Image: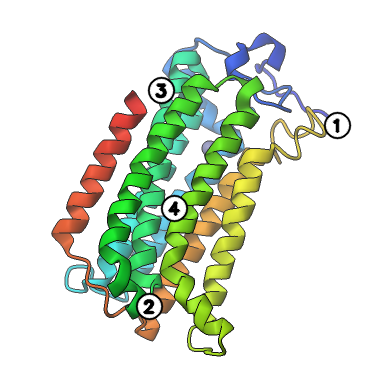
Amino acid sequence: MVWNPPNTLSASKMPALLQNRGIVFGYRQINQPWSYYARSICQFHNETFNIWTHLIAIFIHLSMIYQYAEECNFYRDKQSWTLLIFSVCCIYSTTISVIAHIFHSKNVDAHYSLFLFDYAGAYMYAYASGLIAIYYYSDEYTYGMIVNVYLVAHLIFSFGGVVLMCIMKTSFGHRDHQRTRKGLLSLFFSLHAILMSVTVARKYWLLMNGNHQYLASITNYNWIYLYFILGGLSYSCHSPEVFLPGMFDIIGQSHQIFHIIATLTQISQIRAVRFEISKGYASYGHPSLPSLFILSTISLGGSTAGSRE
Ligand SMILES: [Zn+2]
């Protein structure tokens, strides 16, 4: 049964740029005061669960930081710094996403501006993922071989990703072009993921040659890869709503599934890091706080500037 909450609009009454494939009802009204969208956090419409899936994710991350802070000393323990940066980037990107989903329906300009910032946040998360991959997941041999080249390449990919996302959104933002846009973005993400995978490739190679030292680590990575693939599919395929338009307007649409899988990915990444630390596998990595800070600042500044182009 199709549920059309009160005071919401059908897709036909929305500007084409604010329509989503397979979503027929439940759009909030446009050109309302900002307070209307703020109040809508606690009302039913087709963004309600996009907002709440990420609001809950923020609390999960805060609780994980609190839990870890009870076990280690963030000030003295150098090994915890990269994980702390990763958690902060997760909270940063998730918070921007929440803000975008709350306010983007006001008008087309707000929609574009907020989602360009959302993309900048998403790439801060991708950037931090690359840091934990090299500092925690790579084995000592791989770390020594690639760390310098990898960090530069990863920074270029991270900045390039934001610029590409923004170009795609402004050039192919219309719903008719969503497949092209999301297909190209998925291709770029996959290339970036391959770069990050170089950090763990040797562990897989050792396992295939009968060395089981890193078997438990690889099991953790497999979960991360599985969530990453599921997240990409849910982001790009618009299923199930394209097959049954109108049935998943409020709950069950692909973007809500994407948010949940994105959070599960982040949790599995953090758990994998903590496993590596507990086993002493990441003890050779020595991230210097100044370089981490400088790289993070450049990445944040670059991604924000890219989102404003
Ligand atoms: Zn979202």
Residue 150 placement, left or right of 165: left
Q: Residue at point 43% right, 43% down?
A: 122
Residue denoted by label 4: 59
Figure quadrant of residue 175: top right
Q: Is residue 16 visible?
A: yes
Disc with the residue nearer the chain's start (2 vs 3): 3
Determine the CA span between mark 2 and mark 1.
53 Å
Q: Residue at point 21% right, 74% down?
A: 77
Disc with the residue nearer the chain's start (4 vs 3): 4
Q: Residue at point 41% right, 50% down?
A: 126
Figure quadrant of residue 50: top right
Residue denoted by label 2: 139
Determine the CA span between mark 4 and mark 3.
26 Å
Residue denoted by label 3: 113
Determine the CA span between mark 3 and mark 1.
35 Å
Q: Quadrant of the C terminus?
A: top left
Q: Residue at point 54% right, 63% down?
A: 224
Determine the CA span between mark 4 and mark 1.
33 Å
Q: Secondary structure at mark 2?
A: loop
Disc with the residue nearer the chain's start (2 vs 1): 1
